[in-house]
Amino acid sequence: MLDINGNVAGLVKIVKEFVGYRLSTMPSQSGTTPSVFQNRSQPPKPPFPYVSVDHENIFPVGYSQSSQYLDSNLDEVDEFDYIGTFTIQVNGGTNDDVLSICDEIRSRLFTTKGKRLLKDNLINAGLLRTGQIVFFPTRLSTDFEEAARVTIDLWMRSQIVDTTTDVIETVSVQGDLFEDI
């Protein structure tokens, strides 16, 4: 099955590694951590700048399964490919340079270290492409809040394992086999 939340959690770890030094911190079980979180977890709003990560949608690639095989335990494995769109949004004040932070995240995904972190932290997924950075300021009563968002498309593979598959291991044939041409 697809592990959407696992991939969001993986992206959170990757963003902390990339730009954690440029962000505010928030409390964690082991002290403090850079302010990067899964958007749907709704922690108390940390001070600026902070980053939220979320998933937008998934859609199948093609119309059927991409492969089907028996694994080493003779269980049937069906695989399906998907593209998942995720968002990484940097929020900050006017002096927090959210565009630069967002660009650093997007650019680092293509570095050697970025590719290794993607491989180590994503579950049956890999980077397909990134979108352009979208910037939007919001006027507050006394100041501006700025945000920059980039979309990340991941190629994801879902596996369904059927442990109840019947396998014919041997066949006994008596007599002659005929093939009619």
Image: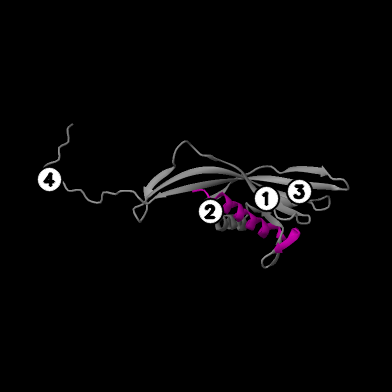
- Where is residue 145 shown, x and y percent of the image? 81, 47
From the image, tell me which residue sits under label 1. Answer: 39
- Where is residue 72 shown, x and y percent of the image? 36, 56
Callout in the foreground (4, 1): 1
How far apart, in angstroms, are the residues tagged by discs 3 and 4?
A: 75 Å
Q: Please say whether residue 150 is one of the residues in the magenta stretch.
A: no
State which region is magenta: 1-27
Q: Are marks 4 and 1 in contact (CB under 8 Å)?
A: no
Element carrying mark 4: loop
How far apart, in angstroms, are the residues tagged by discs 1 and 3?
A: 19 Å
How far apart, in angstroms, are the residues tagged by discs 3 and 2?
A: 28 Å
Element carrying mark 1: helix
* Badge count: 4
Element carrying mark 2: loop
Amino acid at the residue labelled 4 = Gln
Q: Earlier in the sequence, mark 3 or mark 2?
A: 3
Q: Are marks 1 and 3 in contact (CB under 8 Å)?
A: no
Mark 4, Cα crowd under 10 Å, few <14 / some 14-19 / many 20+, is: few
Q: Which mark is residue 99?
A: 3
Q: Which mark is residue 144?
A: none
From the image, tell me which residue sits under label 2. Answer: 123
The residue sitting at 69% across, 56% down in the picture is 36
Callout in the foreground (1, 3): 1
